[in-house]
Amino acid sequence: MLDCEVKNGWLQFLEFIQSRCTHTEFENWIAPIQMTSGNTDEIVLEVPNIFVQEYLLNNYKDLLREFIPLRSNDKELALTFIIAPPKKTAAPLKPVEERPSVENSGYELKLNPTYRFENFIEGPSNQFVKSAALGVAARPGKTYNPLFIHGGVGLGKTHLLHAIGHTIHEQQKKLKIQAITTEAFINDIVDSLRAKSIDRMKRFYRTLDVLLVDDIQFLQNRLNFEEEFCNTFEILINQNKQIIITSDKPPSQLKLSERMIARMEWGLVAHMDIPDLETRVAIIKHKAENKNLRISNDVAFFIAEHIFHNVRQLEGAINRLCAHARFQGTELSIEAAERILNELIQPSNQKKTSVESILQSVAAVYEVRISDLKGESRQKEIAFARQVAMYLAKEMIEESLMKIASSFGGKTHSTLLHAWKKISTQLHVNEDLGRQIQMIRRNIEK
Ligand code: ADP
Ligand code: MG
């Protein structure tokens, strides 16, 4: 990887989170970080104190992996931190200027300009959610209220949320819309408590026409904030004001009060899945086209087959290819793509787990035969053990779902996904199952 590309990774990361966190959060925690050098092996970041370093890693480690290279030996982020020497001049501490309250500033709607319906590629995994989102955008407050969108990271929840915001804003200029992450909502409360302007803040939220709330899971374990959110929620819904919420889990699995969960289930709860192969290909081609990157169908399929967890990773792949293509100016071959994307598509260098080893361990714990696990028997005990094995295979093996599924005697990837979902859901309520799975994992990893 080229030095400038490594540096760009950090800059792209900055740009990306700037659009996602509040101004106060960015200025307090992220802006003080300086990149002192970035070469092919690592990026050195100078932080004012250890808290800033911890903040960055605690909150953004996973996201950083999409932008920053990983060390080849342990696949950890190739980041080194140094603590900045204390400044000599004892300038009086100037608190970061707080973002003027939205009301004062005449209120500003912050939406990512590229997160629009036109740029959202549709496929079986997201068709339902997209059409619900379009419905809500066309007639806010009159169809599903709230609309609750849930699904894993990087699958396009924020994209759709902002797309709804853009559409409503363009079609009904007068409506007062607020798009906010749950963290920003909490920060807003904290800021206004400090500035003794909580009443103004409450008034602001309670007079909105449309409230778009991203990542509601961050409200978990924040009791006081939850109550405030719930009150605002009820006031808005009772006046038929539209609320749209995104989350990484369905309402029932969130650790929130029953009252809050019940409210979120009032409207439509829509799930977003991992896009299938064809949709991933379409997304890759769309993203490449937007960046003027020419890639053949073969290369698009190659990427889609090897990168399948989420769309953000696909974007990361396109960004990398772009950086290289610009320097080389030739059409990309599959071999070149494979080389450039090596870090993204290679399974980690931990000991490779095979489907066989999972089957052996599951068969031993549930006392069934391996051939039954691969077979078609619907007998309860066997079917359950098979689903556990499928769950573990999806969790532990870095391969495409199709490939893993075929190792179970030629099952389809939707069977595998169904098994994975079922066991994931049960794991939340069934402690015995959790222990059994731990035991199987230990056996496999031995
Ligand atoms: P989430 O909020 O679910 O974590 P995001 O909405 O931030 O995911 O999406 C991650 C990235 O992937 C964004 O840049 C988004 O534009 C892109 N993306 C996700 N799904 C799609 C899609 N179906 N079509 C086009 N781009 C998508
Ligand atoms: Mg999001």
Image (spheres, grey):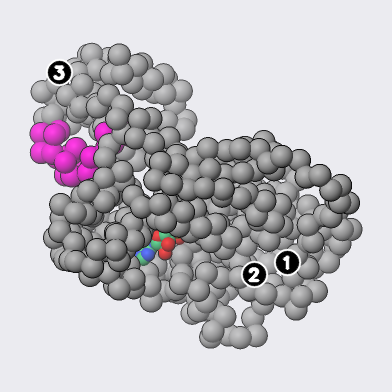
345 vs 225, left or right, is: left
Q: Nearer the viewer, residue 259 or 341?
A: 341
- Which image quarter: residue 235? bottom right
Dividing the image into 4 quarters, which one contains the C terminus?
top left
Q: Which residues are magenta?
A: 394-416
Q: Residue furthest front?
A: 88
Q: Nearer the viewer, mark 2 or mark 3?
A: 2
> For residue 26, which quarter of the picture?
bottom right
| Secondary-structure class at tag 3 | loop
Task: Identify the mark nearer the N-term, 1 or 2.
Answer: 2
Nearer-N-terminus badge (3/1): 1
Q: Which mark is residue 420?
A: none
Q: Which residue is mark 1?
A: 205
Amino acid on which the number 1 mark rests in the picture? Tyr
| Residue in the picture at 46% in, 72% down | 114
Judge whether residue 400 is colored magenta. Answer: yes
Residue at x 86%, y 62% (from the top left corner): 197
Q: Residue at x 27, y 24 (%)?
A: 351
Amino acid tagged 3: Arg
Q: Which residue is mark 3?
A: 369
Question: Judging from the image, what secondary structure is the residue with disc 2 in?
Answer: strand
Q: Earlier in the sequence, mark 2 or mark 3?
A: 2
Q: Please name the residue that numbered disc 2 is placed on.
A: 178
